[in-house]
Amino acid sequence: MTTLTLAKALNEGLRRSMEDDPKVLVMGEDVGKLGGVFRVTDGLQKDFGEDRVIDTPLAESGIIGTAIGLALRGYRPVCEIQFDGFVFPAADQIITQLAKMPLRSLGTLKLPVVVRIPCGGGIGAVEHHSESPEAYFTHTAGLRVVACSNPADAYTMIQDAVRCDDPIIFFEPKRRYWDKADVDLAAPGLPLDRARTVRQGRDVTLVAYGPMVKTCLEAAAAAEEDGRDIEVIDLRSLNPLDVDVLTESVTRTGRCVVVHEAPVFTGFGAEIAARVTERCFYSLEAPVLRVGGFSTPYPPSRLEDHYLPDLDRVLDAVDRSFAY
Amino acid sequence: MTADAPRGVDAPVDAPPELVQLLTPEGERVEHPDYDIELTAEEVRSLYRDLVLVRRVDLEAVALQRQGELGIWASLLGQEAAQIGSGRALTDADMVFPTYREHGVAWCRDVDPVKLLGLFRGVSNGGWDPAEHNFHLYTIVIGSQTLHAVGYAMGIQRDGAEAATIVYFGDGATSQGDVNESFIWASVFNAPIVFFCQNNQWAISEPLEKQSKIPLYKRASGFGFPGIRVDGNDVFACLAVTRRALQNAREGQGPTLIEAFTYRMGAHTTSDDPTRYRLADELEAWKLKDPIERVKAYLFKNQLADQEFFEKIDAEADALGKDVRSRCLALPDPPPGAIFDHVYAGDHPLLDEEREQYLTYLAGFER
C-alpha cells in the first residue's frame, strides 16, 4: 500500500499507462514543464519526452481535433481540458466528431481518446472553473463518461480508460485532488463500467459520483447517530450506467436519493430517478429525490456553499424521503 | 513564398495575385519558373480520362438525386482539375482528409463511387474503410477535418514515416475557428501537411468577399508557412504545385497552403438554387475556363490523342455511369438492428437492451 493524493494517483496511473504502451500520449495546455495546473501530469514530460507529453497551443478544439487525428494514426491520446468551463470550445469536436466517427466507419475506426476534465466546485475559484458539465456528455451516444471519487479508483480507472477502445470523458473531482488514501499499486480495480457500493445500509440508497461521494459518506456517518442506516453507491461510470447495482440496492432499501453538484433540472439525476422508478416501482416507499445545484449559473464563490449540496442538504432530502 | 513586407495603414491594396498556371484555358502549355512539370502523352491522356470519368459519375449522381434515389448530392462540377491534379500528386502512403465534395480525390484513391453514393442515399453515414484507401471519411461539419489531418500528420512525424497528409476544404471553411487552429498547430509543430483549399468562390450563397478581405493563400504567411495560388481549373498546375508541397512536407519542411482558384459550376448541393444569388454571366465566363476542355484541346492540338481516343473515353464514361446507377439502385437498406451497431467498440448494455426491445417490438408485427 502507498499513500497517495488523488492527483498523484492519477499521475501514477498515467505513468504506468505510458510505460505499458508507447502509443499513449498526454496532451493539453501546460501539461509538460508545469505538469498541469493541478500537477496531475507532473514529471511525465521529463521522463517520456516532448513528443509524448505535448504542451499544445491554447485552443481546446485543437486539442481534441488533433487528438482524433493522432488516434486515427494509431496513438492513444490522453487530453487534458484545464477546467470544466473550458470544454465548450471543444464540444463540437467531442460531440460531432469524436463520438460519432466509429459508427460512421461501421466499426473500422477506433478512437481511444481520453478527455480528462477537472470538474466541480468548492475551491473558491472564479467563474467557469467550478462547473459540472457531465449531462451534456452522457447525452451523447458514442462517448463513455466516468467519474472517479477517490485515489484508489483514480489510479486504476485512468489506466482502464486509456486501454479502452472507445472515447471517454474522464471527470476528476478537483476539490478532492488533495485527498489522501492508501492505494495498492498492484491490485486491479473494479471494471471501469461498474458501480461500487461504498457503504452498505438498509434504510435508504444515496447515489452519487465524483466529488459528492465523500459528502454522501459523511452524511451517512452522521445519520448513523440518528439510527438511520444509509447505503451509498458510487456510480463511477455514468455511461454506461450500472443499473443492476442500483436496482438491487433500491429494491432492498425502498428509498433513493441522488446527489450531484450539477443543476437538478434535466441533470444526470433525472435519468437515475427514471431508471430506478421503472425498475423498482413496487419496492419504492417514496419518490426518488434529487439533491443538486440550483437552476442557475454557478454562483460567485462566496455563495458556492449555498449552491453545492452538503451533508445537511443531503440529510434533509433523506428526511423528506422518510416523510412519505 | 515569403511574408509580405510591412505596409502602412494607408498603403494601396495589392495588385491582383499571381496564379500558377501551366495550361491555359485554350490548351496552350505555358512555363512557370518554379513549378514546371514533365508529363508523357500517356500521363496526360490518363489525367483526361480521370477528369471525364469523375464528371460522368457526378452527373449520374445528380440525375439519381433528381429521380429520388439520393437524398442529396454535392456536385464537384467545375472542380475536377483541382481534385484530380492534387489527387494524382499523392503517393499510396499519403493520407487524405476530404470534405463531402471530394469525389474526384476519392476516385484517385480507388474508392468505389457507389460507396460515396451510399452516404447520400442514406444507407450509411460513412461507407468505406479509410485505412484501406488512406482516404478518410467525408466530413460534413465545415472545417472540422483540418484538425484531424494535422493530428494525423503529427502521428506521421512520431512514426518517422515517409508520408504526408493533405486536407481539403473550401473558401467558406477558412472562416472556421478549427481551420485557423489547424494552421497554428501545423505551423508550431511543423507538421507534414498540405492544406488544399478549393476556392470555388461561393459558400452556398455567400461570395468570397463575405469570408475574406485578402486572397486566401495570403493567410498562410500570418501563420508562418508558405501559401500559393494555383489555377484550380488547370490539372497540370494543380498536380505540379501539390506534388511539390507534399514532397516538402515529407522532407520535414512543414505545411503549405494551396489555394486552388476555381468555380463551383453547379449548385452547392441539389437542394440549392444558385439563380437566387449569382448571375448567369459569371457562370458563362467560367465555362470558358473549363478544366476538361483545355486538356482535350491540348491533346488534340499536339496530336497526342485522336478522335478514336475521345470516343473510347466517352464510351467508358457512359458505361461507368450505367454501372454506378445500377449498383446504386441495388444498394440494400440496412436492417433496423444496424442502428445499434458500432456505436461503441466495447460492450454497452443499454444499447443491447434497446436493440433487443426494439427488435422484439418489430417482430410483434409479423405474428
Image: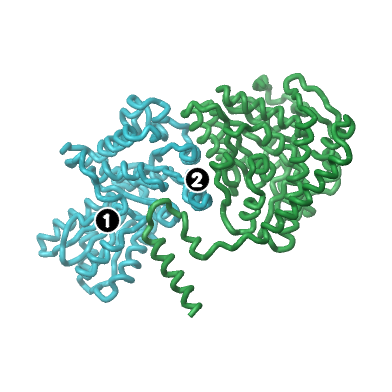
Chain colours: A cyan, B green
Query: Which residue is labeled 2 in the image?
Result: A93
Mark 2 crowd level (few <14, some 14–19, many ≥20, 10 Å Cα): many
Report the label total. 2
Mark 1 crowd level (few <14, some 14–19, many ≥20, 10 Å Cα): many
Taking B300 as reference, is B270 left or right? left
Q: Is label 1 or label 2 in front? A: 1
Residue B217, visible in the rendered structure: yes
If the image is split into quadrants, where does the N terminus of chain B sit? Answer: top right
Taking A295 as reference, is B252 left or right? right
Taking B18 as reference, is B169 left or right? left
Quarter location, residue B222: top right
- Please tell me which residue lies in front, B197 or A322: B197
Query: Which residue is labeled 1 in the image?
Result: A195
Residue drawn at point x = 87 percent, y = 41 percent: B308
- Please tell me which residue lies in front, B312 or A305: B312
Quarter location, residue A242: bottom left
Residue A63, visible in the rendered structure: no
Residue drawn at point x = 64 percent, y = 51 percent: B116
Q: Give the amino acid type for the residue marked by disc 2 in the picture.
A: Gln
Q: Which tag, 1 or 2, sits closer to the chain's start?
A: 2
Q: Secondary structure at mark 2?
A: helix
Are the residues under marks 1 and 2 on the same chain? Answer: yes
Where residue B307 appears, as percent x and y from the top left, is 89, 40
Gap in Å between the C-alphas at discs 1 and 2?
29 Å
